[in-house]
């Protein structure tokens, strides 16, 4: 498959027959990355949840449950093959070293992995741990001309266009905090390494998919009983159904 080959996803045997890939969206205008969607979701879109915290009903939830963090990359490989994403976002825990994690992903066969701040052409905050997905001032000429700022704007527009069309899309890698500022309407699957500690953080991160009433998929990679218990609480609070896949046989 040309699209998957361009992202460098490794080929492994699937646990079950392949899942049909999401339908392409064409003719969409490119959009920059911001903290809020440019267009609000349809008013009639049904929401799920209680206590003022809700998720769209168009968002599917899956948890791959392992026995240790050592097996995380193997779990990701299985989840990636089953979800068959066209425009994926991989979210790491806050404090993770993006350069190290991206390098590890490339070694494991995810050749298209790239840190979000690199894809956007902005500097990473804190030495590469948490990147500011919203960007910031850059030295150089104005956005309409050349220089660093103009190049950054062009990179953002190209990334937004790639996600909108779901063509030549990299595997974007970022952290939980920075993921909140991602507004790429073409993201079809969000992969979360570990589970956010708070319910609202899960909603924000998972909500990078299923934007503007579209269908999406939130995939959690869990490596401890504590995360499993927290997911149970999230599921009850939000009133959602989470499909679970047992991968505890993977030892890393």
Image: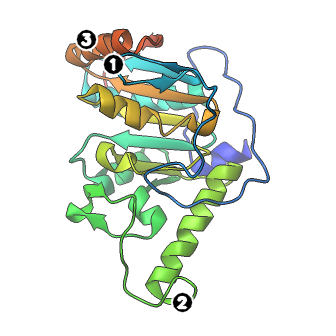
Q: Earlier in the sequence, mark 3 or mark 1?
A: 1
Residue 229 is labelled as 3
Q: Specify whether 156 is left or right of 5.
A: left
Q: Which residue is mark 2?
A: 146
Label 2, label 1: how far apart the Cα atoms are: 48 Å
Q: SS at mark 1?
A: loop
For label 3, count other residues whose C-alpha is less than 10 Å away and answer few (under 14), some (14-19) or many (20+).
few
Q: Is residue 24 above or below residue 136?
A: above
- Residue occupying image coordinates x 22% and y 64%: 127
Q: SS at mark 3?
A: helix
In the rendering, at what x and y percent does residue 176 appear? Answer: 32, 42
Q: Are marks 2 and 3 in contact (CB under 8 Å)?
A: no
Q: SS at mark 2?
A: loop
Residue 76, can we see it? yes
Label 3, label 1: how far apart the Cα atoms are: 20 Å
Q: Is residue 86 above or below residue 6?
A: above
| Between 88 and 233, the one nearer to me in the picture | 233
Q: Quadrant of the C terminus?
A: top left
Q: Tell me which colouring the rendered structure shows.
A: rainbow
- Residue occupying image coordinates x 25% and y 19%: 227
In the rendering, at what x and y percent does residue 231 appear? Answer: 32, 16
- Residue occupying image coordinates x 38% and y 52%: 102
- Residue occupying image coordinates x 61% and y 52%: 169
Residue 51 is labelled as 1
Q: Earlier in the sequence, mark 2 or mark 3?
A: 2
């Amino acid at each position: 498959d040309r699209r998957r080959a361009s992202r460098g996803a490794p080929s492994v045997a699937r646990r079950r027959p392949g899942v049909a890939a999401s339908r392409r969206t064409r003719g969409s205008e490119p959009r920059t990355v911001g903290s809020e969607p440019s267009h609000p979701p349809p008013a009639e879109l049904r929401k799920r949840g209680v206590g003022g915290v809700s998720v769209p009903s168009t968002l599917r939830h899956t948890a791959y449950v392992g026995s240790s963090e050592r097996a995380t990359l193997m779990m990701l490989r299985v989840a990636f093959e089953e979800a068959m994403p066209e425009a994926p976002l991989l979210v790491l825990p806050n404090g993770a070293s993006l350069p190290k994690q991206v390098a590890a992903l490339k070694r494991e066969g995810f050749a298209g992995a790239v840190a979000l701040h690199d894809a956007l052409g902005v500097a990473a905050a804190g030495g590469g741990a948490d990147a500011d997905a919203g960007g910031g001032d850059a030295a150089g000429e104005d956005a309409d001309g050349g220089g660093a700022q103009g190049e950054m704007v062009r990179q953002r527009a190209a990334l937004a266009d790639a996600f909108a069309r779901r063509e030549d899309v990299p595997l974007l890698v970022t952290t939980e905090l920075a993921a909140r500022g991602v507004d790429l309407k073409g993201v079809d699957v969000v992969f979360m390494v570990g589970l956010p500690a708070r319910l609202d953080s899960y909603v924000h991160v998972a909500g990078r998919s299923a934007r503007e009433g579209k269908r999406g998929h939130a995939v959690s990679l869990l490596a401890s009983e504590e995360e499993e218990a927290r997911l149970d609480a999230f599921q009850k609070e939000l009133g959602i159904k989470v499909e679970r896949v047992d991968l505890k046989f993977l030892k890393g």
